[in-house]
Image: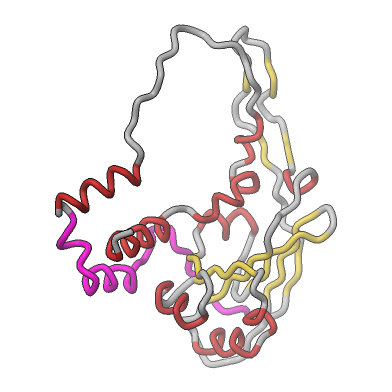
C-alpha cells in the first residue's frame, strides 16, 4: 500500500465513530429490528468499493497535495472532532451504576402494521448484553491527570481502551505505542460521566462507572 495512502486511511479511521462498538448501549433501537417480508421491487446495489476508489484517486494525483506527509501529519496532530467531550477533573472518588434504560418515543410495526414494540417500550441493554471492553476516559492535556495515568496500573493494561478528552491522539498513540481514541459526547451523556478520569466496565449484570479523584492545580 502506498505509504501516504496508509497515513490517509489512518486519518479516516481516526475520524470514524470508533465507539460504534458501544452502539447497542448508545442507540439500542438498532436491536429492535425484525425480518419482515419485502415490499415492492428490489434492485441490486452497484457501488464501487471505497478503498478501490481511494486507490484510483491517489493514482490520479487528486489528493497528492493533501497526502504530503508533513501536511497530513499536521492534520492528524491537530485533529479535533466536533463532538469531542470536555470534562473537569474529578475532585472526589465516585462509583455509580448509570441508568442505561431506553424508552421508545415511537412504535415499531411490521409490514402489516402489527405493533412489534409499542411507544413507551423500555429496554436496558446492560441487563441482556455484556460490555465487551473496559474503557478509561481521561484528559492527558491536564498535567495532573497525565501524571496519574503514567503512574497507574492502567497504562500497563493493554486490553483497556483509552478515550482522551484532550491532547493529540496521534502523538499519544506514538508515545504509548497503543491505539488512543477521542472521548465523544454521546458516550459521556449515555454513561453519566461528570468528571475525569473515569473507568467504564461491566460488573456482573450491570455497567459500573468509577471516577477517580486526582490531586493537582486548577484545570
Q: Residue at x 66, y 69 (%)?
A: 159
Identify the magenta region: 63-91
Residue 216 position, x and y percent, is 57, 92
| Residue at far right of view | 204
Colour treatment of the image? secondary structure
Identify which residue is drawn at 50% across, 89% down: 143
Percent x, y of residue 78: 32, 72
The residue drawn where x is 69% and y is 20% is 116
Please identify the quarter of the rendering in which residue 80 is found.
Answer: bottom left
Residue 77 within the segment the image draws in magenta: yes
| Count of numbered circles in the view | 0
Question: In the shown orientation, is residue 52 left or right of residue 118?
Answer: left
Percent x, y of residue 137? 58, 70
* Residue 4 left/right relative to 172: left
Residue at 27 percent of width and 49 percent of height: 55
Position of 74 with respect to 123 (left or right) is left
Vertical side of 63 occupied by 79: above or below: below
Q: Considering depth in this image, is 61 or 140 the residue closer to the camera?
A: 61
Characterize the magenta stretch by its predominant secondary structure.
loop
User: 8 and 97: which one is in front?
Assistant: 8
**Residue sticking out furthest to the front:** 1
Where is the N terminus found, in terms of image quarters?
A: bottom left
Between 56 and 117, which is closer to the camera in this rendering?
A: 56
Asked if the magenta segment contains residue 87, the reply would be: yes
The image position of residue 215, as x and y in percent, is: 62, 90
**Above/below status of 121 relative to 115:** below
Amino acid at each position: 500500500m502506498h505509504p501516504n495512502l496508509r497515513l490517509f486511511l489512518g486519518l479516516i479511521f481516526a475520524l470514524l465513530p470508533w465507539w460504534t462498538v458501544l452502539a447497542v448501549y448508545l442507540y439500542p433501537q438498532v436491536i429492535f429490528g425484525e425480518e419482515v417480508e419485502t415490499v415492492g421491487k428490489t434492485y441490486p446495489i452497484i457501488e464501487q468499493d471505497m478503498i478501490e476508489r481511494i486507490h484510483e484517486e491517489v493514482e490520479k494525483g487528486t489528493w497528492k497535495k493533501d497526502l504530503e506527509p508533513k501536511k497530513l501529519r499536521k492534520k492528524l496532530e491537530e485533529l479535533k472532532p466536533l463532538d469531542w467531550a470536555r470534562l473537569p477533573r474529578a475532585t472526589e472518588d465516585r462509583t455509580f451504576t448509570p441508568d442505561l434504560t431506553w424508552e421508545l418515543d415511537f412504535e415499531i410495526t411490521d409490514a402489516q402494521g402489527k405493533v412489534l414494540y409499542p411507544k413507551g417500550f423500555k429496554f436496558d441493554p446492560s441487563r441482556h448484553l455484556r460490555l465487551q471492553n473496559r474503557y478509561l476516559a481521561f484528559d492527558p492535556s491536564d498535567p495532573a491527570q497525565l501524571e496519574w495515568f503514567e503512574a497507574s496500573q492502567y497504562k500497563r493494561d493493554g486490553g483497556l481502551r483509552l478515550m482522551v478528552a484532550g491532547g493529540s491522539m496521534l502523538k499519544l498513540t506514538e508515545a504509548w505505542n497503543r491505539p488512543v481514541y477521542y472521548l465523544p459526547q454521546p458516550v459521556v451523556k449515555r454513561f453519566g460521566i461528570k468528571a475525569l478520569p473515569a473507568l467504564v466496565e461491566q460488573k456482573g449484570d450491570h455497567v459500573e462507572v468509577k471516577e477517580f479523584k486526582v490531586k493537582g492545580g486548577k484545570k
